[in-house]
Amino acid sequence: MIKIIKKLNFLLLIIILLLNIKSLNGKIVYGDILSFERVLSPEIGKNITLPWGDEKVVRLCNPFGDEKVPIVVSNNIPLGKEVSNDEDFLSMFGNHSFATLLAHFNCKKSEETCIRINTITPQFTSCLLIASIDGYDHVTFNSSLGGVPTNMNSWKVDTVGKFSNYLPKAGRIIVKNDTRQISLGCFEESSKNNLNYVLIHPTKPIDTIDICYKSFSEASEYVLYGLLDCGDASKSSFSISGYVFSDKYYSSNRTNNPPITGQTVYIKQRSGLVYDLDGKPVTQAITDERGFYYFNNIPSGDYQVYIRPSDPTTQFSPITDLNLEDAYTNKATNGSIEAYVFINGSGVVPVSKTNFDDIMLTSVYVIREMNIGILPKNISLIGMIFIDYNANGIMDVDIANTSATDTPFSGVKVQLIDGNRVVREVITGADGLFSFPDVPYISTGYIATIYTPTGYVMTNYPFPPAPSPGEIINLEIVPETELLVGLINNDNYCQDAPLMAIICYANQGYNESHADDPVLITFPSTATKHLYNMPHGTVQHVAAHKDIGSVYGIGIDRNTGDIFTSSFMKYFSGFGPNGTGAIYKSTTKNNNYQSSLYFDLNRAMNQIDYCGTDSHVYPMDNYDEGVEKVGKIAFGDLDIHNGSLYTIALASRELLRVSISDPTDFQLYNIYNPCIDEPDDWRPFALGIRHGNIIIGGVCTMESNPVTKPVGYVMEMGGNIILQIPLDFPRGCKSFGGSFCIPGDYTPWSSVYFDSQPWISDLTMDGENMIISIRDRGGDLDRDVGTYDILRACFNGDQLILENSGSCGGVNGAHLLPSGYFGTPDGINGGEYYNDNFYYPTDNDGHDNVASTAGVVIPGYHTLFGSSLDIDSVGQGTVKVWDNTNGLLLYGIGVYLQNNENPTNNFGKANGLGDMEPICYNYIK
Ligand SMILES: *[C@@H]1O[C@H](CO)[C@@H](O)[C@H](O)[C@H]1NC(C)=O
Ligand SMILES: *[C@@H]1O[C@H](CO)[C@@H](O)[C@H](O)[C@H]1NC(C)=O
Ligand SMILES: *[C@@H]1O[C@H](CO)[C@@H](O)[C@H](O)[C@H]1NC(C)=O
Ligand SMILES: *[C@@H]1O[C@H](CO)[C@@H](O)[C@H](O)[C@H]1NC(C)=O
Ligand SMILES: *[C@@H]1O[C@H](CO)[C@@H](O)[C@H](O)[C@H]1NC(C)=O
Ligand SMILES: *[C@@H]1O[C@H](CO)[C@@H](O)[C@H](O)[C@H]1NC(C)=O
Ligand SMILES: [Ca+2]
Ligand SMILES: [Ca+2]
């Protein structure tokens, strides 16, 4: 203690000399507030509390305990003397006559000592003045608030200066900092008497500063410091402003995000209520149409700005920007911003009347962009794309035999759009659904952009004019309502209940006794009764025998409804007036049809027998010649595709294409011949359309070398074989009765009419699966009976696989083993997918295979319509209807019934029907 007093005496001496205080009257003149006597270093360990300046109360203590007691005295330095006349220096002390500072002594080479200055309340506007640092002094300090260390890089230097303008030069103080501490030093030669100083302030509130000092020379054993008020509280009025925005981008940035108008923003001080500088309480502000709010004319303080969402599950912008100087960014954590607003506070700037946000403010300072981002409530949006087969705009889901069931449309790209922004993108799956779960709600709403596949149009337009096929469609999509989008293209479209056109055959030459018999008729596809029992007029006679003679293939022009038919060689039914190369067109006129020659391949090729010579013998009384030409002259199946009709010229085994708008535009294509050993046995006949391309079906008939069974082929136009059909499977009984079974196995083609001679006559797609109709050539060689097959081939994602044992593609059909009516094996591996058996109870007999010669699947239908025979009578030409999903025979419509009065009217069971097509019109004209 004595030692310390001694040192103090020494110190006083120094100070008196230094400050040039001439007369002390035996008593040192102290500052207004600090008491020299009280601030003696031994006391520091006892936590001295002393008032400092007008408002502050400061506690001093020794942070390191008794071993390292700092020597500190208070000091009142008179202002405005020679040693203290620098204007900048003076300006810091207002109109005070003394600068009240602490002097911290440290003897050369004694250990560093520290002093802790603690203010009871957080300091917003305090600056730290440290003075008298020369080359031998080393001062460091750090600060904290509530025990939380300050990042010392956030302190800012205000002034580096000197006490006196009069005395020689003072050395400049160098400030170095890192996050933990600030170090002060001086490397310039300085006058002993002109003290240097640095004024430095925190940009965040603090309540504690630890200052440590060590001296390296007796020439300099003290530094001075003090807390000054940097802000003039009377001038320091503040505002807080910011934006509340809907953070739909999850960007935590108000840029581009929509404002939230009418949002209440609350404010409070950590220590309680907020009163503005007029003394009025301030509690809340409401955001304007820009989402902007402000609190005006409030004192400096430790504020919390927050919102109180009515929905407790409200979520806020994910990223909080702690740098309050940044514009645009979200400053709130969970909807609440903590901001120390004071002069020099981070982000606190003078109000600028050129800044739009400040126009309403009357304060001197403002902290702007105290933004609060609210994540919009998530919503889920869903929709579905379906194929609207009948284009009625409704997703028809009922399953009926004679109407389409609309199906989900997979593989369609759908984007969710907000303005120009693609929020998400999906491709519809097998369920046709597109869903956007958990997207932020936006008041402007979303658009679903449908990338309509090529050729498709939307059927449930909310808008005329309708976009053209394949055009991208933008639709509003709203929560809680599934956006249903029906799409259709022409190929998949058919109006409800289309008429069906079918070929019948009339006996004899076209101009003989049966000249007026109808051979091309239409009937409602919804018919369930036999046509001959239906009201008059239900069936329309399109063309008579005299108009077109014997034809097989039918094609419908979807634009006009015109019907094209091609000549066909059949026993006891003569060619039409224009011979073997004729393709006829039947066109509606005044509610009636008119038929005429459209194209003649013989004429077009300038060769009278290009399609074969008419081998019938006329007049045809009871008998016909030339039947070995069946299947070898005239034409096969006919289909229309892309504005042209296609048929097969049987004599030359070529594919013929003729434009349906211009008969002079035609073309013949070679067809690949898969019958390597006996090329002459290749009999292409059937046509179909798969994946938008023509496919061809034919048989290697084994006619010229009948040692093996015939083999069928289905190929693409270029000859790529997509299906091989060995026609060697058991076929039950061609006819059976109580005690007999006439085997129905296929034979090579021959002139024996009772042989079952396989003739692939039609190819029908059921989605990705294929239905192959096999006519019995034997039925066209006589007037006896033909028995048919339908085979189903299922696509396994890679190739078509023929039905086997009555199953196809993993689906069991109608006739698993044993499949023949009397248990005989019937079909590939003994079973068959489609039930084509016929049993006639009256006579206790029947046929095991009366399937179809031409099949129709109207788009979207689950049924197969086939031209066949025998449903409930013998000698009946019949359209049968099967269920494609299980092979069941559902019902049949008798087309005609051979009766005993006029047995030669039709062909009865002898292949009395030909091709069949629905008259579907184009939806997109
Ligand atoms: C001084 O105050 C500090 C903190 O307020 C405390 O930790 C310390 O024990 C006090 N010292 C004495 C001697 O009272
Ligand atoms: C000087 O200080 C006194 C009290 O500290 C105050 O009343 C007075 O207004 C001040 N004068 C000026 C010019 O600031
Ligand atoms: C200053 O730093 C020292 C060492 O890390 C630490 O013990 C002390 O508490 C700090 N002082 C303040 C005021 O944060
Ligand atoms: C501390 O360092 C940072 C940069 O790291 C600087 O911006 C800041 O002004 C410095 N503070 C002082 C008091 O020198
Ligand atoms: C916020 O948006 C502004 C304006 O687009 C941009 O300059 C700034 O970098 C953004 N800030 C952040 C943190 O993304
Ligand atoms: C086709 O037959 C009809 C009816 O006999 C006849 O009027 C027409 O001239 C024939 N057309 C040709 C090109 O021979
Ligand atoms: Ca529909
Ligand atoms: Ca059968």
Image (cartoon, grey):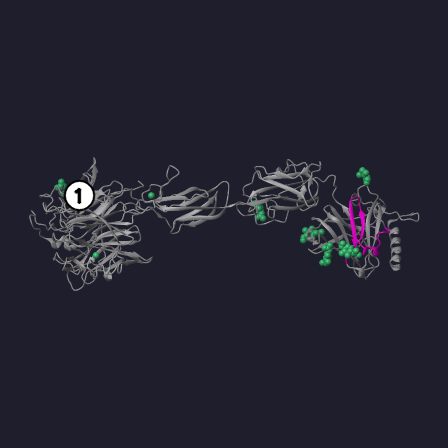
Asked if residue 45 lies in the magenta stretch, the reply is yes
Q: Quadrant of ligand 8?
A: bottom left
What are the residue bounds of the magenta stretch? Answer: 36-63
The residue that disc 1 covers is 532
* Residue at x 39%, y 38% (from the top left corner): 462
Q: x%, y% of residue 438?
A: 49, 48
Q: Secondary structure at mark 1?
A: helix
Question: Closer to the camera, 354 or 257?
Answer: 257
Q: Quadrant of residue 661?
A: top left
Q: x%, y% of residue 808?
A: 29, 57
Q: x%, y% of residue 148?
A: 69, 54
Residue 742 in view (yes/no):
yes
Report crowding for label 1: few under 14, some 14 to 19, many 20 or more residues within 10 A (C-alpha): some
Amino acid on which disc 1 is placed: Tyr
Q: Quadrant of the C terminus?
A: top left
Question: Closer to the camera, 704 or 914?
Answer: 914
Question: Closer to the camera, 708 or 735?
Answer: 735
In the drawing, does residue 292 fall left or right of residue 790? right
Asked if residue 728 lies in the magenta stretch, the reply is no
Q: x%, y% of residue 442?
A: 50, 42
